[in-house]
Every structure is written in structure tokens, then in C-alpha cells.
Image: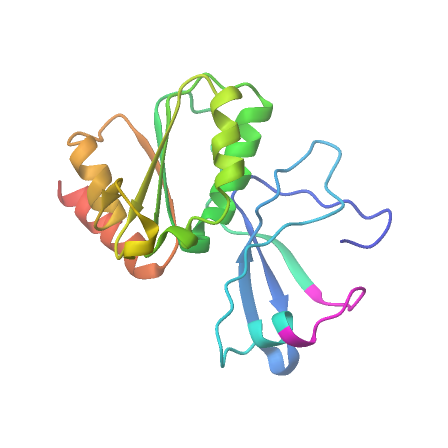
């Protein structure tokens, strides 16, 4: 939650920096959709990294009403409001957070854009917000969801797409010249997507 009477404004896809002791910063994308009147509560998707500088505190020591300093809004990754053409949203792991903000914004506006969501994870449990994704079918007329697992477990009973998530995009869209792409997640996934998409 945010301080009372201080709603914040940002664009769908942007992030905040948490300001920690010793000048350390940790960046997390906002999963909440922006509102014209401002937002009073922010949602973040935080993966627990043992030995990390911030997440052990979040998962083990943080209590309700603990105070944290943030700086926001940050980043040039956000929904381009004047675009109307087809779009590919590519997420890996918790890189889904800003994509959720963008999708929620598009759904609230009853967007008719052609929207293709590719969400990659290692195992099925990494696609952790399926209820939200499944709800989009009734809100977005031209929405397609393609989940991709790179290392499915036998217990996943997975019959969907496998391999690298950005390669699934390339298989489905050999020509991306007229498509707007939003990619977020592990740096190696985003950089591989950028390099391979541009080369192709």
C-alpha cells in the first residue's frame, strides 16, 4: 500500500526502484494497471532468491506496515498508447509482471488489437497467474495465449509448446515487420529475443 492521500501515476509496464541501505537499489516492475485518478496500491511479482540482498527480507522478515522507500515511475518500457496494430507480449518468469499491467490496461479499454501473449517458464508452476490469463479470453476479443516450458517435469503432464519462448514466437511469426513486441524477463531471454528477432 502507498501513503494515504498520495495516489501515484505511471504508465503500464514501468517499474519502481526500492531504495535499500547502503545506497543499494532493487528494481521491480509494477503489475498493477495505472488509473487516471492514480493508484493507491501496487502489485509486484517477486521471486525468492536465497542469498539475495532484498528477497530474503521480503519473504522472511517483512511485516505488515513496514516502511520501504521507492523511486518511481521509471523505465521506457511501457504501453505505447497511440499504437493500434498487432502486438506480441513475451514474458519469462516474473517478467510477466509488467505484461500483466499492460494486459489489464488493454482489457479495461476493451482493446480490439490482435494480442499474442507468449509466457515462458521452466516448469508449469512458473506460470503462476493462470487464472488472470484465462480471464482475458472474455475481455479481449483478439487475444491468444501461448505458454511455453523449457524444462517440464513429468508431473507437469505438459502437452503444450516446449523450448525457448522466443523461438516459439519466431516459429509462429517468421515476419514480424508489422508487429509491436514487448519483451520482459531474464536478461538472457530478452537479449536473445532482441538479437534473433532483428537477425530474422
Assess whether residue 128 is covered by the magenta stretch: no
Q: Quadrant of residue 36?
A: top right
How many numbered dots are placed on residues in this image?
0
- In the image, residue 74 lies at what x, y percent? 56, 53
**Observer-nearest residue: 106 or 138?**
138
- Please report the residue visible at 63 percent of the width from the left and 70 percent of the height from the top: 58
- Please report the residue visible at 15 percent of the width from the left and 32 percent of the height from the top: 174
Residue interval drawn in magenta: 60-69
Above-or-below relation of 170 to 194: above
Q: Indicate left or right for 23 with 151 as reference.
A: right
- In the image, residue 132 lies at what x, y percent? 53, 37
**Observer-nearest residue: 83 or 90?**
90
Magenta residues, dominant SS class:
loop
Q: Indicate left or right for 60 with 197 as reference.
A: right
- Residue 81 visible, this orientation: no
**Which colouring convention does the figure follow?**
rainbow
Q: Indicate left or right for 23 with 93 as reference.
A: right
- Residue 15 visible, this orientation: yes
Above-or-below relation of 115 to 123: above
Above-or-below relation of 54 to 171: below
- Please report the residue visible at 58 percent of the width from the left and 76 percent of the height from the top: 56
Q: Quadrant of the C terminus?
A: top left
- In the image, residue 142 lies at what x, y percent? 40, 19
Q: Quadrant of residue 23?
A: bottom right
**Observer-nearest residue: 110 or 70?**
110
Amino acid at each position: 500500500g502507498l501513503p494515504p492521500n498520495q495516489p501515484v501515476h505511471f504508465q503500464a509496464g514501468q517499474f519502481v526502484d526500492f531504495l535499500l541501505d547502503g545506497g543499494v537499489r532493487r528494481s521491480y516492475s509494477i503489475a498493477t494497471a495505472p488509473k487516471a485518478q492514480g493508484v493507491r496500491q501496487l502489485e509486484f511479482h517477486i521471486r525468492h532468491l536465497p542469498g539475495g540482498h532484498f528477497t530474503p527480507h521480503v519473504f522472511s522478515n517483512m511485516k505488515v506496515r513496514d516502511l520501504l522507500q521507492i523511486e518511481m515511475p521509471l523505465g521506457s518500457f511501457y504501453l505505447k498508447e497511440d499504437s493500434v496494430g498487432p502486438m506480441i507480449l513475451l514474458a519469462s518468469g516474473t517478467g510477466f509482471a509488467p505484461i500483466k499491467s499492460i494486459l489489464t490496461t488493454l482489457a479495461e479499454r476493451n482493446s480490439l488489437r490482435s494480442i499474442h501473449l507468449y509466457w515462458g517458464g521452466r516448469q508449469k508452476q512458473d506460470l503462476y497467474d493462470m487464472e488472470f490469463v484465462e480471464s482475458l479470453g472474455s475481455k479481449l476479443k483478439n487475444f491468444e495465449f501461448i505458454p511455453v516450458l523449457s524444462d517440464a517435469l513429468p508431473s507437469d503432464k505438459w502437452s503444450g509448446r516446449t523450448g525457448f519462448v522466443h523461438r516459439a514466437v519466431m516459429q509462429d511469426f517468421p515476419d514480424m515487420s508489422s508487429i509491436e513486441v514487448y519483451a520482459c524477463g531474464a536478461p538472457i531471454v530478452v537479449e536473445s529475443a532482441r538479437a534473433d528477432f532483428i537477425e530474422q
